[in-house]
C-alpha cells in the first residue's frame, strides 16, 4: 500500500517575510512541493501585473478594431454606464440588454450624447459605425464597393447609422437604406439610427413610408432634449 505523507515548512521572502511551504510525498518520493514556487504574495503581484498587461493589450486590439469599424477615436472609451447627462436613458439600457430584432432611434438636439451612446452600443456588440454620408459614399464608390458595404451592413452584430437627416439623399441611396434596414430585420439583427432632427415626425418623414412602417413594429425611440453639454461647458 502506498504511503502518502504531507509536510509543511516555512519559506522566507525578502519582501513579504515568512510563508508556509507544503509538500506531499508518496513512498518517499516528493510528488508536489511549494519549495520551487515564489511566495504567495509575490506570485499574486506577478499575476496581477500579467493580467493588467493582458487587459491593456486586449483594449488596444479592441480599439484598433473599433476604429476600423468606424467608431471615432474620441468615443473609444464610451460606455453606457458612464452616461451622466440629465436624460433618463432606460430605453437605451433595455436595448443594450436585449437588442435582438429592434431598431433604436436616438434623436434630439446637438450635444446631448447621441453619438456617445451609439458608440458605446457599437463597442459593446462589436458592430459597425457609419454616418449616412460615409455609408452612401462608400456604397456608391463602385458596384463592387456597394456589394461589400451591403454585405457588411446586413451581417454585422450591430449597425449604427449616424447623422440621418443632415443631408438629403437620392432615390438610389434611399433604396439602399431600406434594403439594409429590411434585411437586418429579416436576420433579427439590431440597428441604431441617430439623428439631430429633434422632432420625431421630421425623422419619420425623412426615412420614408417603407422604413417608418418597419419602425411602427420594431422601432423604439429615445429622445435626448436637454441642453448641449458643449455649450454648457463654455459658461462654467
Image: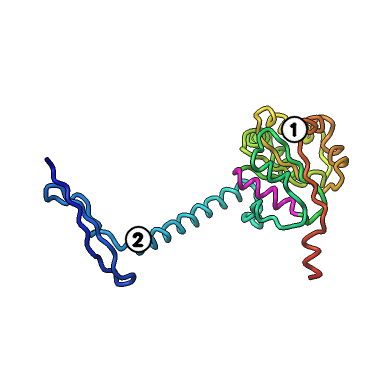
Question: Which of disc 1 and disc 2 is earlier in sequence?
Answer: 2
**Residue 54 spot, x, y in % from top left:** 45, 55
Residue highlighted by disc 1:
218
Residue 95 to residue 63: above or below: above
- Callout 1 environment at 10 Å: few (<14), some (14 to 19), or many (20+)? some
Magenta segment range?
Answer: 113-126
Picture layout, residue 6 above or below residue 132: below
The CA distance from mark 2 to mark 1 is 52 Å
Residue at x 20%, y 56% (from the top left corner): 7
Farthest top residue in view? 186
Image quadrant where one finds the C terminus: bottom right
Where is residue 4 drawn, in percent x and y? 17, 47
Q: Secondary structure at mark 2?
A: helix
Circle 1 — which element? Answer: helix
| Up/down of 175 relative to 201, above or below | above
Residue 124 is inside the magenta segment = yes
Q: Position of residue 40 (x, y in %)?
A: 33, 61
* 170 sits left or right of 143 in the view: right
Q: Residues within 10 Å of mark 2 (few under 14, many from 20)?
A: few
In which image quadrant can residue 106 be found? top right
| Residue positioned 53% across, 54% down in the render | 59
Magenta stretch: includes residue 33: no
Q: Which residue is mark 2?
A: 43
Amino acid at each position: 500500500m502506498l504511503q502518502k505523507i504531507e509536510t509543511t515548512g516555512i519559506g522566507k521572502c525578502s519582501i513579504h517575510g515568512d510563508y508556509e511551504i507544503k509538500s506531499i510525498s508518496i513512498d518517499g518520493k516528493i510528488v508536489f512541493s511549494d519549495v520551487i514556487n515564489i511566495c504567495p504574495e509575490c506570485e499574486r503581484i506577478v499575476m496581477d501585473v500579467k493580467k493588467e498587461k493582458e487587459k491593456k493589450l486586449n483594449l488596444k486590439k479592441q480599439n484598433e478594431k473599433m476604429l476600423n469599424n468606424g467608431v471615432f477615436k474620441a468615443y473609444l472609451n464610451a460606455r453606457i454606464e458612464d452616461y451622466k447627462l440629465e436624460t433618463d436613458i432606460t430605453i437605451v439600457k433595455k436595448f443594450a440588454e436585449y437588442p435582438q430584432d429592434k431598431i433604436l432611434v436616438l434623436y434630439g438636439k446637438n450635444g446631448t450624447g447621441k453619438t456617445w451612446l451609439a458608440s458605446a452600443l457599437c463597442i459593446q456588440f462589436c458592430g459597425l459605425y457609419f454616418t449616412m454620408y460615409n455609408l452612401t459614399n462608400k456604397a456608391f464608390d463602385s458596384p463592387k464597393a456597394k456589394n461589400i458595404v451591403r454585405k457588411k451592413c446586413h451581417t454585422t452584430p450591430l449597425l449604427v447609422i449616424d447623422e440621418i437627416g443632415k443631408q438629403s439623399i437620392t432615390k438610389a441611396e434611399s433604396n439602399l437604406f431600406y434594403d439594409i434596414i429590411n434585411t437586418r430585420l429579416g436576420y433579427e439583427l439590431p440597428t441604431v439610427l441617430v439623428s439631430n432632427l429633434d422632432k420625431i415626425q421630421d425623422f419619420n418623414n425623412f426615412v420614408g413610408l417603407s422604413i417608418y412602417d418597419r419602425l411602427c413594429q420594431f422601432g423604439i425611440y429615445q429622445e435626448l432634449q436637454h441642453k448641449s453639454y458643449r455649450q454648457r461647458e463654455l459658461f462654467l
